[in-house]
Image (cartoon, helix red, strand yellow):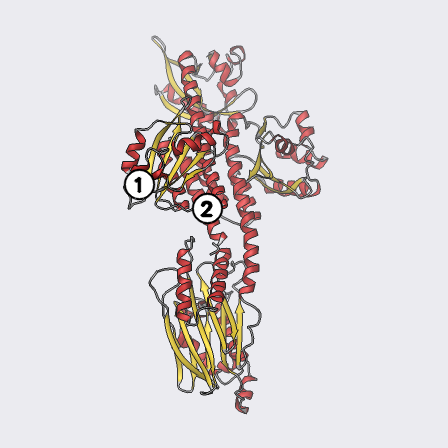
């Protein structure tokens, strides 16, 4: 059975988002190992997994952690694993490490190459697979993820690609963790060497005039001692924070020491920095408090890291809140304002290779609108000197600390109007990162500060690059969804042909009404399949909307079409469809269906009907004896043992069978929903009319109840034996519009 691709995409996206969020929160590999193993094992549908880490500078793999499904106690296997020192090329993990490629063993319990084979065999685990982290050059492998199953099922090419993507995520986490560890060790070593001189120490009198300024203060603020001593401390304070100094000195005069607090200061080059300040009184034995000492520590990197973590945690959710490419781009640029930039721009690579179709957000909306207009008229030359073009050619993030420098202005400016916009907006600094996803270059993401004391520096690039990676993935996911959604729409048009197939001896009328504007396509399906002695009629509905529902609808319809060639009982056909859905991998592979087999019975002058219902709204049979409903059964795809409800009846001349999806019953607010009885009453009212008039009346009723638009698609199908002449009373009645007749 062909698996619905859109369900797999959603499943993958959900797993990717969950793992990305966990990797962002965690600090150590031990913290994320179980989550990673669970996520990948869930994708593989395997039973156990283990993570091995390659030692830094050591030619061995170290067992980190193991995970298994709830009904499997794999501790004996993990105990055996902890005792091993796996070398490159030895055992399955060592083989994946040495080759840099995914390796598997369909039955490793019998191979002498795998020492843990007997232990795994005792647990019922026979197959194994190992994924290097990352997949690629053996010398670049940082870890190996190993998975075990009771039976081997070769992964598809698509799944192998997804496993590589998850491997890359974990590899990035390990590499960054190691880099942070090395950086932390370097910082600690430096702190020991320069202890006592790492913090800026400043003294000032009770009026705020600086009296001492150590070398660390020179490095922190950029002013020499000669430039600083004798000046009021306010020259390193932003205008909006100058009131702080009065409050600080007032507390010092009262004899208070201030607890360490965080604030902002301005360097000589105009850049804003975050500092941690500790203020203490300076006392003279005779004069008492004569001033204050200030110990200042630069915490810009730490503060930015904290903000970055908080921002990234929310950004992934914001980026994925829409699967529309244009809306996703807007979400990305707007998310950066004002925390990361005053102006944020995405310049897309157009089909002609130039950069344009730009999306802009700014603290001042006028700036955003003007810049978008400029880009539409003057796209960027990919060979030019503009920062976005330079970054895409280099393939790496870059910063421009001073956008006011004449040489930089000449590189950036596109026209005199653009130059004027840059001056009015106050561009001061820029950081630009490439947008690449799944091997495609989508464009460039630019962050611009338009405040004089804000500067991007090298410490921002790692965070902004990660943000760019997530933004690119969100944009590409939206692109993929749009393409799959378009394919699904084309597929689903075939599920509801404009006219049903003709069946000799039967009149059939169908209407399909789509949900309102902006609501995704649903999963409604109908089919009429003529046979030598009559026909089959299918009507059904699939859980969910959009491409996922379309994919399952296609599977259900084609399964029914294939099965009726070999099975002549509606109940057995739906039982097999149920088995098919249970074998699927989607989380919402559920469907309702009503399948009818109609045979002409010339001896009785009517049609024999065999009907099977699986959780679908019941069919309504209109006859001289009254109205009868045929329904029941369980939803398909939910339970292995849930047979449809079977019915048999005969439809004679003048009798009608009416079928519908739940969109008809649930049109409009809850108070106006209608049950099968109401369907039967309206159908009975028009039982003597043309079939098209009957279905038109049912359509009008649903639209009247829906008011501001349908929330779900509707299919209504009516069938009756042909050849019944209308009476003159009937002809007169059908000339009256349905709404007036019911009034």
Label 2 vs 1, first from the N-terminus:
2
Q: Total number of numbered labels?
A: 2
- The quadrant holding residue 288 is top left
- Residue 221, x across and y down, in percent: 51, 18
In this rendering, the answer to whether 434 lies above or below 548 is above
In this rendering, the answer to whether 258 lies above or below 613 is above
- Residue 536, x across and y down, in percent: 48, 73
Front residue (pair 694, 314): 694
Dot 2 falls on a residue whose secondary structure is: helix
Residue on which disc 2 sits: 12
Q: Can residue 701 be seen in this view?
A: no
Front residue (pair 73, 120): 120
Residue on which disc 1 sits: 121
- The quadrant holding residue 541 is bottom left
Q: Single out the residue that lies furthest toward the right.
A: 416
- Residue 602, x across and y down, in percent: 48, 86
Residue 281, label in figure:
none
In this rendering, the answer to whether 619 lies above or below 722 is above
Q: CB under 8 Å between callouts 2 and 1? A: no
Q: Residues within 10 Å of mark 2 (few under 14, many from 20)?
A: some
Residue at point 45% right, 58% down?
544
Dot 1 falls on a residue whose secondary structure is: helix
Q: Is residue 597 visible?
A: yes
């Amino acid at each position: 059975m062909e698996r619905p691709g859109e369900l797999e995409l959603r499943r993958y996206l959900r797993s990717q988002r969950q793992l990305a969020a966990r990797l962002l929160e965690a600090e150590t590999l031990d913290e994320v190992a179980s989550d990673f193993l669970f996520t990948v094992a869930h994708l593989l549908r395997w039973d156990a997994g283990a993570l091995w880490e390659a030692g830094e500078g050591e030619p061995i793999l170290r067992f980190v952690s193991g995970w298994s499904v709830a009904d499997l106690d794999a501790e004996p296997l993990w105990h055996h694993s902890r005792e091993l020192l796996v070398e490159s090329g030895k055992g399955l993990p060592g083989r994946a490490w040495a080759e840099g490629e995914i390796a598997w063993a369909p039955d490793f319990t019998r191979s002498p190459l795998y020492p843990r084979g007997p232990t795994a065999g005792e647990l019922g685990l026979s197959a194994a697979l190992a994924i290097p982290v990352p997949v690629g050059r053996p010398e670049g492998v940082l870890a190996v993820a190993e998975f075990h199953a009771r039976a081997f099922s070769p992964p598809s090419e698509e799944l192998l690609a997804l496993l590589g993507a998850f491997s890359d995520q974990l590899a990035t986490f390990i590499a960054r963790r190691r880099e942070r560890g090395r950086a932390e060790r370097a910082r600690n070593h430096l702190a020991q060497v320069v202890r006592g001189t790492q913090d800026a120490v400043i003294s000032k009198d009770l009026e705020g005039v600086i009296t001492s300024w150590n070398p660390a203060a020179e490095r922190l603020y950029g002013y020499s001692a000669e430039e600083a001593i004798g000046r009021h401390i306010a020259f390193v304070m932003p205008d909006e924070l100058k009131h702080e100094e009065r409050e600080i000195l007032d507390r010092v005069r009262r004899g208070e020491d201030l607890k360490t607090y965080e604030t902002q200061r301005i360097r000589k080059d105009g850049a804003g920095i975050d500092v941690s300040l500790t203020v203490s009184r300076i006392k003279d034995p005779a004069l008492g408090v004569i001033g204050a000492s200030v110990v200042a520590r630069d915490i810009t990197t730490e503060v930015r890291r904290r903000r970055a973590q908080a921002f990234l945690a929310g950004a992934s959710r914001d980026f994925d809140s829409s699967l529309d490419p244009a809306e996703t781009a807007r979400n990305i640029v707007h998310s950066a304002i004002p925390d990361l930039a005053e102006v944020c721009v995405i310049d897309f690579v157009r089909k002609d290779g130039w950069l344009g179709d730009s999306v802009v957000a700014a603290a001042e909306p006028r700036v955003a609108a003007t810049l978008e207009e400029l880009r539409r008229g003057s796209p960027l030359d990919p060979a030019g000197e503009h920062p976005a073009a330079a970054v895409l050619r280099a393939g790496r993030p870059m910063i421009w600390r001073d956008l006011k420098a004449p040489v930089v202005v000449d590189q950036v400016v596109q026209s005199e109007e653009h130059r004027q916009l840059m001056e009015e907006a106050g561009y001061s600094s820029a950081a630009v990162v490439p947008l690449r996803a799944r091997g495609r270059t989508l464009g460039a993401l630019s962050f611009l500060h338009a405040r004089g004391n804000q500067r991007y520096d090298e410490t921002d690039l790692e965070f902004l690059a990660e943000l760019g990676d997530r933004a690119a993935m969100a944009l590409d996911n939206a692109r993929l969804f749009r393409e799959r959604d378009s394919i699904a729409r084309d597929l689903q048009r075939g599920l509801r042909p404009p006219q049903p197939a003709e069946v000799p001896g039967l009149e059939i009328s169908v209407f399909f009404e789509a949900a309102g504007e902006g609501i995704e396509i649903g999963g409604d399906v109908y089919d009429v399949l003529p046979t030598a002695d009559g026909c089959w009629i299918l009507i059904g509905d699939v859980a969910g909307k959009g491409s996922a529902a379309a994919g399952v609808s296609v599977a259900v319809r084609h399964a029914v079409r294939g099965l009726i060639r070999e099975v002549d009982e509606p109940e057995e056909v739906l039982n097999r469809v149920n088995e098919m859905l249970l074998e699927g991998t989607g989380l919402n592979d559920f469907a309702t269906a009503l399948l009818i087999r109609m045979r002409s019975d010339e001896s009785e002058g009517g049609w024999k009907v065999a009907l099977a219902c699986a959780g679908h709204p019941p069919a309504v049979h209109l006859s001289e004896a009254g109205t009868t409903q045929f329904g029941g059964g369980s939803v398909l795809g939910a339970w292995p043992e849930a047979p449809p409800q079977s019915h048999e009846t005969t439809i004679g001349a003048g009798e009608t069978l009416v079928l519908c999806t739940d969109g008809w019953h649930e049109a409009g607010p809850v108070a106006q929903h209608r049950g099968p009885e109401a369907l039967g009453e309206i159908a009975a009212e028009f039982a003597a009319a043309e079939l098209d008039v009957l279905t038109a009346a049912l359509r009008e009723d649903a639209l009247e109840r829906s008011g501001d638009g349908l929330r779900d698609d509707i299919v209504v199908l009516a069938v009756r034996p042909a050849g019944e002449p209308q009476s003159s009373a009937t002809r007169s009645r059908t000339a009256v519009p349905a709404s007036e007749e019911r009034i």
